[in-house]
Image (cartoon, grey):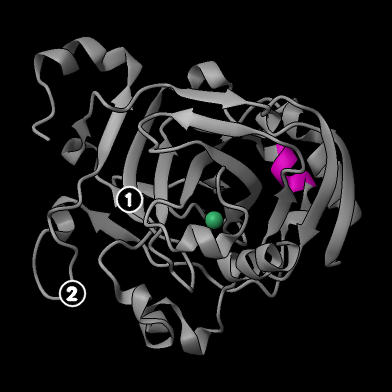
Amino acid sequence: MKSLISLFLLSFVLHLSSSAGPENWKDIDAVCGGDRQSPVNIVTKATQLDKRLTPFNLTGYKTVFDTTVKKNNYTIEVAINTTATVSGGNLEDTYKPLQFHLHWGTNGVRGSEHTIDGEQYPMELHVVHIKQKYSTLTEAFKDPFGLAAFGFFLEESNSDNKNFDNLITVLGSIQNKTGDVSIKNVSASQFLLPEETMTSYYRYNGSLTVPNCGESVIWTVFEKPIPLSKKQRRDTNGWDIPTRTASCRTYSLPVERSGGPGQRGASLRLHHYNIQSVPSMLKQPSPD
Ligand SMILES: [Zn+2]
C-alpha cells in the first residue's frame, strides 16, 4: 500500500522534461489525450447551479497529528497521517484524504493549475482523497469516481495566515534540500478553508493533472481563496525548487471545448454550488 501510494504520488506530481512537455503527454499515455482531462479553465458564466451539490460532511480533519513534509524536485507534499473522511457534496461515496500538495509559479509567476475566467491565482493547494472502501490506489483507479480532489486557490493577503506558520518554518529549514522532514501537531483543516466557508465551489469530473492522467477524479474547486501574505511567501525560500519544470496544460469547458477536433464534448458540464444562491437556484432548477 505504502509503495503504491509513493508510486502514485510520484506520478501525480511528476513533471516531465521540456522535451516531453504537456503537449506530448498523450504520446506517453493515451489517456492524457482523453476527453476528461484536468485542470480546466472555469468559465463562470457557463457554469450551472446544481441543487445536488450540497455542503460537505467532514470528519477527522481537525484531528492533530505528526507527519512528514516531502520536498522533492517537483512539489511540497504533506501526508495526512490520520483517519478522516469526507462525504456529501454529491460525492457518490465516502472518501478519505491521503495527502495535500501545492502548485505555484517560480520567480513571482502565478502558478495555480485551475483558472477562473482565464485568471490564474498565485498558488493552488490540492487535497487528494480516495474512496474509503479502497485500500489501494490501483483499486481506486479502476473506478471512474475512485478519487476526489479538492482544489483551493491561495491569494496574497496583507496579514499573515498563522495556520501556515509551522509549515513555513519547516520549509525554511529545508531550503535547497530535498527529502522528508517531520512536522508536528498539524491538522488537515488548518491548511484548508474553514469548513463553514467551503460553501461555494465548482464541480466537474476530471483527471490527474500529470501522467498517468488517470480519468478517475471528481474535482471540487473552491471559489473562496485561502490567504497567504506576501511576507510568508517571501519567507519560504524553501518553496522554491529551481529544477521544477513548468506546469500542466489547462483545458476549458464547457463552452470553449464544445466542438472541434480534439476538443472535449459538450456532455461534460461544469456545475457549481453557492449556498448564497440557493433561492434562485430553486426557481431555476438545473436542466440535468
Ligand atoms: Zn495537484
The quadrant of the picture showing ligand 1 is: bottom right
The residue carrying mark 2 is: 262
Is residue 208 shown in magenta? no
User: Farthest residue in the top direction?
Assistant: 279
**Of helix, strand and loop, which mostly describes the magenta segment?**
helix
The residue carrying mark 1 is: 205
Q: Residues within 10 Å of mark 1 (few under 14, many from 20)?
A: many
Q: In this picture, which residue range is highlighted in magenta?
A: 231-235
The spot of residue 118 in percent (x, y) is: 31, 50
Is residue 232 shown in magenta? yes
Disc 1, SS: strand
Q: Is residue 26 left or right of residue 3?
A: left
Q: In this rendering, does residue 175 appear at all? A: no
Tell which tag, 1 or 2, sits nearer the viewer.
1
Q: In this rendering, does residue 62 appear at all? A: yes
The spot of residue 157 in percent (x, y) is: 60, 30
Amino acid type of the residue tagged 2 in the rendering: Gly
Q: Residue at x 61, y 42 (%)?
A: 97
Quadrant where the C terminus sits is top left
Q: Are marks 1 and 2 in contact (CB under 8 Å)?
A: no
Say which mark, if any, is on residue 70. none
